[in-house]
Image (spheres, rainbow, N blue to C red):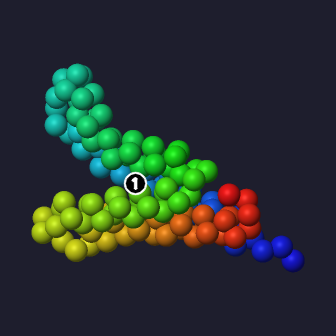
Amino acid sequence: MKNNNPVIIRWTARIMSIAFAAFLSLFALDIFNEGNNFWNTAIGLFMHLIPTFLILLVLIISWRKEWIGGIVYSLLGLAYIIFAWGKFHWSAYALIAGPLFIIGVLFFISWVQRKNQGTV
């Protein structure tokens, strides 16, 4: 019987990255409640979506080079905790940094598995 764990972990990391980017994008929707004109809304929407663009950029880079995803996603989670420390309830840190750490670990595990299989 074939072991499907490497494939499951590889795709779970990628799917979680896409889902996390979609989750972060939801926070950008509050720009539409401010009643700004078109250009101010467009600029504000772009600013709110910068973290989403960053997550998607890291996903594109780490699609083939999982070790980069393992490092960068973990560093993004750590950076969020450092820069936002003391501003929010602990659950906010768990909600934002937690998935980043999990995605980072999944990319790192995927990289190690591919390295052990000799397909890197």
Name the image quarter holding residue 57: top left
Left or right relative to 21: residue 7? right
Residue 73 in the image: above or below residue 102: above
- Residue 72: percent from left, percent from top: 41, 57
Left or right relative to 20: residue 61? right
- Tag 1's secondary structure? helix
Three-letter code, disc 1? Phe
Residue 87 in the image: above or below residue 63: below
Left or right relative to 35: residue 119? right
Q: Residue furthest bottom?
A: 1
* Residue placed most toward the observer, 117 or 34: 117
- Residue at left offset 66%, top offset 69%: 113
Q: Which residue is mark 1?
A: 23
* Residue placed most toward the observer, 102 or 42: 102
Name the image quarter holding residue 4: bottom right
Name the image quarter holding residue 44: top left
Residue 73 in the image: above or below residue 38: below
Callout 1: 10 Å neighbours few (<14), some, many (20+)?
A: few
* Residue placed most toward the observer, 59 or 36: 59
Please tell me how many numbered marks the rendered image carries: 1
Residue 9 visible here: no
- Residue at left offset 18%, top offset 71%: 89
- Residue 99: percent from left, percent from top: 41, 66
Residue 51 visible here: yes
- Residue at left offset 50%, top offset 49%: 59
- Residue 69: percent from left, percent from top: 49, 57
- Residue at left offset 30%, top offset 65%: 78
Q: Quadrant of the C terminus?
A: bottom right
Q: Quadrant of the N terminus?
A: bottom right
- Residue 81: percent from left, percent from top: 24, 66
Q: Residue furthest left?
A: 86
Left or right relative to 82: residue 6? right
